[in-house]
Amino acid sequence: MTDDIDQVLIGALMEDSRRSLKALAQISGLSSPSVAERLRRLEERGVLKGYTVEIDPKCFGYQLQAIVRIRPLPGQLQEVERQIQAIPEFTECDKVTGDDCFIARLHVRSMEQLDTLLDRLNTHAETNTAIVKKTPVKRRLPPMA
């Protein structure tokens, strides 16, 4: 469980994970050593799992983003999961309930690359692909309170 100060610190880090201990101390009203100790405890408890950098895939030539629903053919579940993990253009994947076993996010440089990557899965699974036009809600935390 987290308290109000933990939530302030987490919120501040979500806005900018590079904030200094001094800046976090000013935001939370604590001393820098107290902030460091709270962050250490949040890390130990698994509340904070890491600090990250957000990049724009377009800056690396990835012009298209797709959401792919993947339904493995009978007996192919583990092979499909292995292939998804082995293709670095799959940047996220969830194993889900329902007709499809996987919902994945894929970044590609072209439609041709999309076809090539999906062809690697097609001998083991059926896919249904939607191109992302816009992301009105970026990945975010659920309400903490």
Image: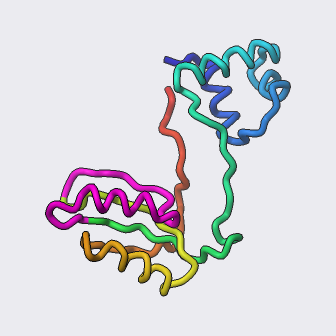
Q: In screen coordinates, is 105 left or right of 129? A: right
Q: Residue at x 60, y 24 (%)?
A: 43
Nearer to me, 5 or 122:
122
Looking at the image, which residue sits at the far right? Answer: 22
Please determine whether, in this image, residue 84 is positioned above or below residue 49. below
Please determine whether, in this image, residue 34 is positioned above or below residue 62. above
Q: Is residue 87 magenta?
A: yes
Q: How is the image coloured?
A: rainbow
Q: Residue at x 50, y 26 (%)?
A: 145
State the image coordinates of residue 56 (x, y, percent, origin top left): 67, 64
Looking at the image, which residue sits at the far bottom? Answer: 112
Nearer to me, 21 or 114:
114
Q: In screen coordinates, is 45 left or right of 131? A: right
Q: In screen coordinates, is 143 left or right of 18? A: left
Q: Residue at x 75, y 12 (%)?
A: 34
Q: Residue at x 60, y 25 (%)?
A: 7
Q: Which residues are magenta?
A: 71-98
State the image coordinates of residue 75 (x, y, percent, origin top left): 16, 60
State the image coordinates of residue 87 (x, y, percent, origin top left): 47, 65
Please determine whether, in this image, residue 3 is positioned above or below residue 27. above
State the image coordinates of residue 90 (x, y, percent, origin top left): 47, 63
Give the mark count: 0
Q: Is residue 118 magenta?
A: no
Residue 102 in which image quadrant: bottom left
Residue 103 in which image quadrant: bottom left
